[in-house]
Amino acid sequence: MKILHEIPGRVRVYYPDLKMSPNICRQITYSLSARQGIISVRTEPRISTVVVYYDQAALSFDQVIRILSVFELYDDGQLLSRDFWQQSASLRRAVQRSAVSGVLLTMSYATHFLQHPNALLDVFTTIFTGYTVLSHGDRKQGRIRHPDIITAFITSFALGPTKMTEVALTSWIVNALELIQDYHQLNERQQKMLTQTAF
């Protein structure tokens, strides 16, 4: 969402990724009109913008922007957008891959600790952890920039080919931390929508 124009008591915002169908426009108008402090709403579906007039005594500018930002999550006929559900499903798959990598790494280090190393297990663990790390993230935004992938490249150069299990462990730890952050961001997005629909 982008703020196009703002004067006291009036704000105009643009939704670049929102398909403003008649159904969405009705949802936006109905939701905003039911909010105390909103005086009037005008949707402009051809250019994906919404103009809101509000009572400055009842709502601050920041409050109005927070309310309007929720509509980024809308999709035609759905409470939450397809993009939200796709991200949620993608996160679940990433967590599953990371969990398998964690088990493999634990088994690999356990065999070394017990002084019964298994070269085949080490190789498989390294390959699967590499797949886990490389498949994490949004391809459109560029996976190569993710901290877990950057960590894998740096540690592989620093430690060398004989320490690939350590490289896998280091990148997996960063991957797990990234997944925790992704979960919190997705949860905050969902809570924002649920809060909006509560009024």
Image: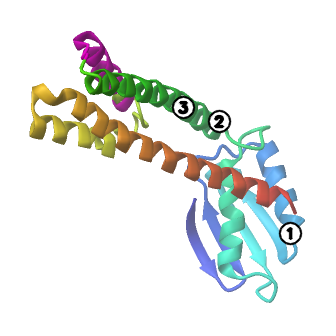
Tell which tag, 2 or 3, sits nearer the viewer: 3
Give the residue at x 9% y 32%: 160
Q: Is residue 129 magenta?
A: yes
Residue bearing the label numbered 2: 85
Q: Which residue has dot 3 on it? A: 90
Between disc 1 and disc 3, the foreground one is: 3
Q: Where's the C terminus, which quadrant?
A: bottom right
The percent coordinates of residue 190 (x first, y second) are 69, 50
- The residue pinned by badge 1 equals 35
Residue in the image at 10% along x and 40% along y:
158
Res 92 visible: yes
Residue 54 placement: quadrant: bottom right
Cα separation, mark 1 vs mark 3, equals: 34 Å
Q: Amino acid at mark 1?
A: Arg
From the viewer's perspective, is residue 91 above or below residue 181? above
Give the mark, 2 or 3, whose residue is nearer the N terminus.
2
Alpha carbon separation for disc pair 2 and 3? 8 Å
Q: Three-letter amino acid code at disc 3?
A: Ser
Give how far across and how far down residue 57 sits, in percent: 80, 89
Q: Name the residue rendered at 61%, 78% in the picture.
A: 6
| Mark 2, secondary structure of its residue | helix
Quadrant in the picture for the N terminus:
bottom right
Q: State which region is magenta.
A: 116-133
Q: Quadrant of residue 132?
A: top left
Q: Residue at x 90, y 65 (%)?
A: 34
* Nearest to N terminus: mark 2 or mark 1: 1
Q: Residue furthest top?
A: 120
* Amino acid bearing label 2: Trp
Is 4 placed left or right of 67 in the picture?
Answer: left
Q: CA distance from mark 2 to mark 1?
A: 27 Å
Upstream in sequence: badge 1 or badge 3: 1
